Image: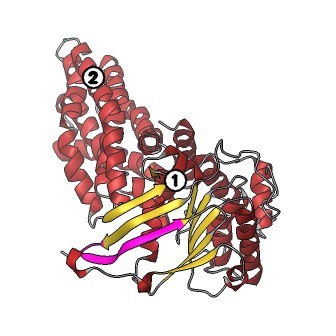
Amino acid sequence: MNANPLNGTPATTSPSSPLPSLRLVDVACRRGDRLLFSGLDETLAPGELLWLRGGNGRGKTSLLRLVAGLSAPEGGQILWGDAPTRRNERFANELVYIAHTNALKDDLTAAESLAFLARVHGRDASAPAIRAALALLGLAGRERTPTRSLSQGLRRRVALARLALETAPALWVLDEPFDALDVDGTATLHALLAAHRARGGSVLLTSHHLHLDAEAASAGFRVLDLDLLPRDAALLA
Amino acid sequence: MNGAVFLAVYLRDLRLAWRRRTEALLPVAFFLVAASLFPLGVGPDPQVLKLIAPGVVWVCALLAAMLSMPPLYAADHADGSLEQLLLAPDAGLAVAAAKAAGHWTISGAPLVVAAPLLGLLLGLPAEELSVLFMSLLLGTPILSLLGGVGAALTLGLRSAGMLIVLIVLPLAIPALIFGAGAAAAVDAGQSPSPHLSLLGALLIACLVGAPPATAAALRIAVE
């Protein structure tokens, strides 16, 4: 790795300009014929963590997918600074999206899986960097283990090891990152989140677990409750 | 096109195929078994077999290629890899091209290599065997590229396997006609060049047109 991800050391691959804010402007989201929410205005500045909450089916994952650019909003705009996020090369380079699926292949080893994802997203995929990232997530000695042989918690750790490869400020969009993690894994993820925010990165995440207490007291921690947003009946088909 | 994504996906697919070798060999096994049924079905007359051999080999290659199409994107879609791939900058074209290239390397190239053996079994003379080899060398990448479009269009649908066949087979008819026609032209004492040239033109058209269509279909599938 170019820098220790846990101490907030400035990245050696820092972008030419500061990390922009993520801006959601009057965003509405529809799944099928159901309007999940509308009128969402929110700004996520560098260094902030936004905890997305809401009941099942309120659109937390859908909002994360909208932000990542995997789907288009029913209305409104999602901006990275002043530019739309979709088909935005800078945004693509500065986004780390980890879904609830781990994007791992059963027939690849933990190291191969992580190296593949790092290579695809233009991150350091060298063997030492991959080894260090896996070790940070408590997977030292399991680099050559096929992911099919790993438990659900260890598979989640392999997926989250991508975060340990990050050295530059970026936007992390994480869907239930604490799922399946044990106490040690949770503590490591907290440390990664804190270091990331310290170097100017922003985080948007969902979690049904109350693991965010440690973050809650810190500056820049905010909660967005989708249960409080209107579901505009007029927009329903 | 994102070259790093192309290389990463292509090499990963080859590695995955190597680790599931038995699965990867199924299309070529189907190809050999299906083609070897024809002498049993139409009779052992060498003249008849020689006459139908190019068509038999081409149809069996086409069906074998289709057999390996349904899982092309389905596994990546199911485990979340496809979303990750499409999030990389400028990656849609690279993913589509890499998957088609990987499919051809894993499934198409073995068919090309096995085809002369089948032609020999069906009594094709040496000059027709070389033309058959050439036609499949040009034609099987077309099948991989068209199959990629079909696999992307049917991603996440029920009965995707059958739908891919129904979508791709009509599109592959020109390749089948020119491919089988090349060897038949040699048998008729004509030059196979026009057929091979048209097959080459089809390949270029598919190389230009299929990856953007596949990339667009993939983006729709993940939305």
Are there few (<14), some (14-19), or many (20+) residues within 10 Å of tag 1? some
Instruction: Answer yes or no: are tags 2 and 1 on the same subunit.
Output: no
Q: Which quarter of the rendered picture does the C terminus of chain B lie within? A: bottom left
Asked if B113 appears above or below A92 in the picture, the reply is: above
Q: Position of residue B103 (x, y in %)?
A: 43, 44
Q: Circle 2 is placed at which residue position? A: B201
Q: Would you say A71 lies left or right of B82 here?
A: left
**Which portion, as a residue range, is magenta?**
A31-43
Q: Residue at x 66, y 45 (%)?
A: A15
Between B169 and A85, which is closer to the camera in this rendering? A85
Q: Residues within 10 Å of mark 2 (few under 14, many from 20)?
A: few
* Label 1 sits on residue: A81
From the viewer's perspective, is residue B54 above or below residue B186?
below
Residue B70 picture quarter: bottom left
Q: Is residue B165 visible?
A: yes
Q: Position of residue A216 (x, y in %)?
A: 68, 82
Residue B86: image location, x then y, percent: 46, 52
At label 1, the amino acid type is Gly
Q: For the image shown, how many numbered marks are present on the structure? A: 2
Q: Secondary structure at mark 2?
A: helix
Amino acid at dot 2: Ala
* Residue B49 showing in the rendered view: no
* B59 is within the stretch colored magenta: no
Q: Quadrant of residue A46?
A: bottom right
